[in-house]
Image: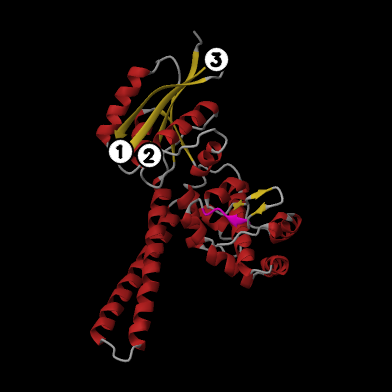
């Protein structure tokens, strides 16, 4: 009988349930499914899962819990396992999706995804997850709330404009809309003050924000959004992974000479990251001559401004990771030569 060297519980997390698949890896690197079971995504479900796992696993063999970063639904379980001292890894969804495509799995269900996550955990050497700092969690919550309020503000403004343009206006309706608009505007300002205070009170975050703000187009709100959505770049290991996580990676379908689809951005990623890079890219193009020149060059080759704008978004996002890793502010002379050397940016033909 072969000796087991690793045990992994792969968990596909949903809003109400945890679909689990337990597997093991032996000395010959062969994987075996031990058992499957579904639990409720509650504290009682967590306790049942732990009892079930401990009955089926060998204490002398390392046990690892692996799950995807699925919005907010995985957070309760992650913190529960972390506080109990279990080894846990949280994987970006795009990494699991890429691994899934390498397997001969044709049916996509919660059960098959749990199995894929389990196999991924058995085959890879994964970093142990650390609970995020409160400041990054708060940054995420506040920036998302502000984004939602900003969207509501635009809707109300459009409603007021439409009502005032009518032949027969309802003054009371317009008054109510203006009151809602004033309230939302006030709340947005309160959130911005809270964000500034939060950043100022944490020396490490303040330093990172100042570094990111040295990049053309990047302001305090964008920097805060990036840090909040990436948990301070905790799960990010390189620039390509960051753009893939944001859904700004390019997908292309091509087969032989007959099948050739248009390259597009995947959009299979964090929508909040994509959204927060839109205005910074436009600002950099408008106010910085270097980025404007790159934008013009891409437009002259591709002929579509939106493609060039998305290319700038992608490059700016990659640059935030470079600045974070080097801990050095933006150097226009260095990045001018660097950007000009990277010809692939001109070949990015992603569209929104």
Instruction: Relative to 10, say whether 226 is above or below.
Output: below
Is there CB contact under 8 Å for labels 2 and 3?
no
Instruction: Relative to 122, say whether 55 is above or below.
Output: above
Residue at position x 51%, y 39% in the image? 96
Disc 2 residue crowd, few under 14, some 14–19, many 20+, Cα 10 Å: many
Q: In the rendering, at what x and y percent does residue 85 appear?
A: 38, 28
Q: Where does the magenta region start and end?
A: 263-267
Q: Earlier in the sequence, mark 2 or mark 3?
A: 2
Residue at position x 30%, y 72% in the image? 183
Q: Is most of the magenta stretch helix, strand or loop?
A: loop
**Gap between marks 2 and 3 measured at Cα:** 30 Å
Q: In the rendering, at what x and y percent does residue 196 appear?
A: 43, 61
Q: In the rendering, at what x and y percent does residue 207 appear?
A: 53, 53
Question: In the picture provided, is 201 more to the left or to the right than 239?
Answer: left
Q: Classify mark 2: helix, strand or loop.
A: strand
Please give the residue where the numbered disc 2 appears in the rendered image.
Answer: 13
Q: Classify mark 1: helix, strand or loop.
A: loop
Is there CB contact under 8 Å for labels 2 and 1?
yes
Q: Which mark is residue 41?
A: 1
Q: Which mark is residue 27?
A: 3
Front-lying residue, 301 or 175: 301
Quarter the C terminus occupies:
bottom right
Instruction: Relative to 34, say whether 193 is above or below.
Output: below
Q: In the rendering, at what x and y percent does residue 292 appear?
A: 67, 69
**Residue 276, magenta (yes or no):** no
């Amino acid at each position: 009988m072969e000796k087991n060297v690793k045990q992994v519980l792969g968990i596909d997390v949903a809003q109400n349930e945890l679909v689990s698949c337990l597997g093991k890896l032996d000395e010959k690197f062969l994987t075996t499914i031990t058992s499957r079971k579904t639990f409720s995504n509650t504290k009682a479900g967590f306790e049942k899962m732990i009892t079930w796992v401990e009955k089926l696993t060998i204490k002398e063999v390392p046990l690892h819990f692996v799950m995807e970063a699925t919005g907010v639904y995985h957070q309760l379980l992650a913190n529960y396992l972390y506080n109990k001292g279990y080894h846990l890894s949280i994987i970006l969804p795009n990494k699991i999706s890429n691994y899934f495509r390498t397997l001969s799995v044709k049916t996509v269900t919660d059960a098959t995804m749990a199995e894929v996550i389990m196999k991924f955990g058995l085959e890879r050497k994964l970093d142990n997850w650390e609970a995020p700092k409160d400041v990054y969690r708060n940054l995420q919550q506040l920036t998302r709330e502000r984004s939602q309020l900003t969207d509501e503000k635009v809707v109300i403004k459009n409603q007021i404009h439409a009502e005032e343009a009518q032949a027969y206006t309802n003054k009371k309706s317009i008054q109510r809309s203006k009151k809602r608009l004033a309230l939302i505007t006030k709340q947005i300002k309160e959130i911005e003050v809270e964000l500034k205070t939060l950043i100022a009170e944490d020396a490490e975050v303040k330093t990172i924000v100042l570094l990111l703000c040295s990049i053309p187009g990047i302001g305090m709100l964008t920097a805060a959004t990036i840090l909040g959505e990436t948990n301070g770049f905790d799960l990010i290991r390189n620039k390509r992974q960051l753009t893939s996580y944001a859904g700004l990676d390019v997908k292309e379908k091509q087969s032989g000479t007959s099948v050739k689809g248009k390259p597009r951005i995947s959009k299979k990623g964090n929508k909040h990251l994509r959204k927060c890079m839109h205005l910074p890219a436009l600002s950099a193009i408008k106010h910085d001559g270097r980025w404007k020149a790159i934008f013009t060059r891409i437009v002259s080759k591709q002929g579509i401004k939106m493609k060039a704008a998305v290319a700038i978004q992608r490059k700016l996002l990659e640059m935030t990771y470079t600045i974070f890793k080097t801990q050095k502010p933006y150097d226009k002379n260095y990045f001018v030569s660097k950007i000009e050397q990277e010809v692939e940016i001109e070949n990015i033909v992603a569209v929104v």
